Each structure stands twice: as C-alpha cells, then as structure tokens.
Image: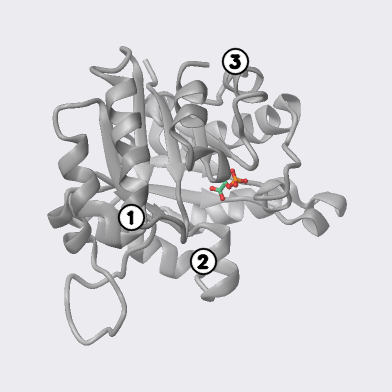
Amino acid sequence: MVRTLIAGNWKMNGLAASLSEIRAVASGLGQGASGREALLCLPATLIASAADIARGSALKIGGQVCHAKPSGAHTGDLSAEMLADAGASHVICGHSERRADHGETNVSVSMSAAAALRAGLIPIICIGETLAERRTGKVAEVVLTQLEGSIPESGSADRLVIAYEPVWAIGTGETATPEQAGEVHTLIRSALRDRYGPAATDIPLLYGGSMNPGNAAGLLATPNINGGLIGGASLKAADFLSIYRS
Ligand code: PGA
C-alpha cells in the first residue's frame, strides 16, 4: 500500500522563534495516523533543533537541497551527509525555484538525488511544467523528460518520492484541479511502472502548488495523488495539521 506523505516546504522562511510552530505540529501529530507520514523540509539553520523537537513524534524533518559531493571546497553548499547528520530523513531535489534561480538541471538534480541516497536520505524529486508549456500542449513531454532525467541510476522504488509541482501553481494561489493533477500523476505512475515494474505502485506521488486546507481533500482523494508538497500553508501548524487530517 502506498503511504500518504504530507510534506511542508518552508523555503527561505523560519527563524528560531518559528520552532514553536514545529513544536505544535509535533504535538498535534502525536504518534500519527497509520499509513500517513508528516514531514517538514526546513531551512538548514533549523534542522538540528527541529529534529530534536520531533524526536519521539510522528514528524520527520527534511532539507531542501544538497550538493552531489559528501564534503569539500564548496563554499555555502550543504552535503546530504550533513543533512542526515543534523537529523534529516528526506531532501527536496530539483524544486522549480532551484531550477530557475540556481540553474539546476535534470543532470545536477539526478546527482543530488544520488547523493541523498548515498547518505541514507529519501530524495523528493520535483518536476512540473510552466504555464507557457501547458498552454502549448507540452505538459507530458516536459514532465516525462524531467522525470526520466532527474532520477539517478541508483534510484529504487522503495526510496523515492516524486512531487508534481506545476510552476504556474506555486505560490500563486492558483491550484491545479484534481482532474488536471490526476491526469499528470497517472502519466508519471505509468512511466515509473515502465522503469520499476509493480514496485512503482508504492512510490508516493505528491502534488504541490498552492495546496491548502480548503483544497487538500479533493486533491488527496484523486487516484495516484498520494500526498502534498506544501509551501505557504505549511508555515502555520494549524494549516499543516488540517491538511494532514484531510
Ligand atoms: P506553495 O509552494 O504551496 O506555496 O504553492 C509549493 C512548493 O513550492 O513546494
């Protein structure tokens, strides 16, 4: 059975004072619900403290980016080993903001996902089309090319999460409809079946793009949508918990 994963992406938000939200999420989740996981991908500065807070609860902590190498002369970068050492279990790879702002490509995303696996982390590989690509009928081509190019050779179905995040829906308040998202998720599932066979059924496919407490239930009830990657609405414990309970 594929597990549902409700993952928050705090992006470049959160100071020490925000640890109170993480405390509220951890205590609100308690031991969690069966078949359902909760994860917050935090700025690196908060990961170790948050992992301490989350210990003993159902909340997992993740990072938002990692370098391909385990260590070395790469000023300002973070390795997957560092994230794991700080208490992370997952890391986001190839978010569209990283692809746009930092020139990440399918090749570099696949290298950072390989690094995540090497360090014992689960990579959450992000893919998704722009509005222009959707308007010109290129959704399937773009999404499947990104999927194919971003999963490393070392990837395996039991240690992989894919997030479909249409760029036009991120941070815009505009959400893909359950039908639009479901259509792409079904395509992704079928490409993963070609690659991994029946084991692909258990790979969590997350939807991301303005998911909130009002629209989460409809999206999460759609076949092949197994969770969410949530930006803005993950910053407040009450909203995140409400989506988790959807
Ligand atoms: P959003 O961000 O929920 O604020 O649209 C989602 C994401 O970028 O992961």
User: Hey, what amino acid is under mark 3?
Assistant: Ala
Q: Residue at x 30, y 61 (%)?
A: 44
Q: CA distance from mark 2 to mark 1?
A: 22 Å
Residue to which mark 1 is pinned: 153
Q: Residue at x 35, y 30 (%)?
A: 25
User: Hey, what amino acid is under mark 2?
Assistant: Arg
Query: Residue 96: where, in percent of width, then height?
Result: 57, 59
Look at discs 1 and 3 and give the one toward the viewer: 3
Q: Is residue 194 left or right of residue 203?
A: right
Whether residue 88 is visible? no
Q: Which label's residue is closer to the chain start, 1 or 3?
A: 1
Location of residue 244 (image quadrant): top left
Whether residue 127 is visible? yes
User: Hey, what amino acid is under mark 1?
Assistant: Glu
Query: Residue 1: where, in percent of width, then height?
Result: 36, 15
The circle on residue 98 is 2
The crowd level at tag 3 (other Cα within 10 Å; few <14, some 14-19, many 20+) is some
Front-most of 179 and 149? 179
The circle on residue 221 is 3
The crowd level at tag 2 (other Cα within 10 Å; few <14, some 14-19, many 20+) is some
Where is 99 relative to 92, above or below? below
Mark 3 element type: loop
Look at discs 2 and 1 and give the one toward the viewer: 2
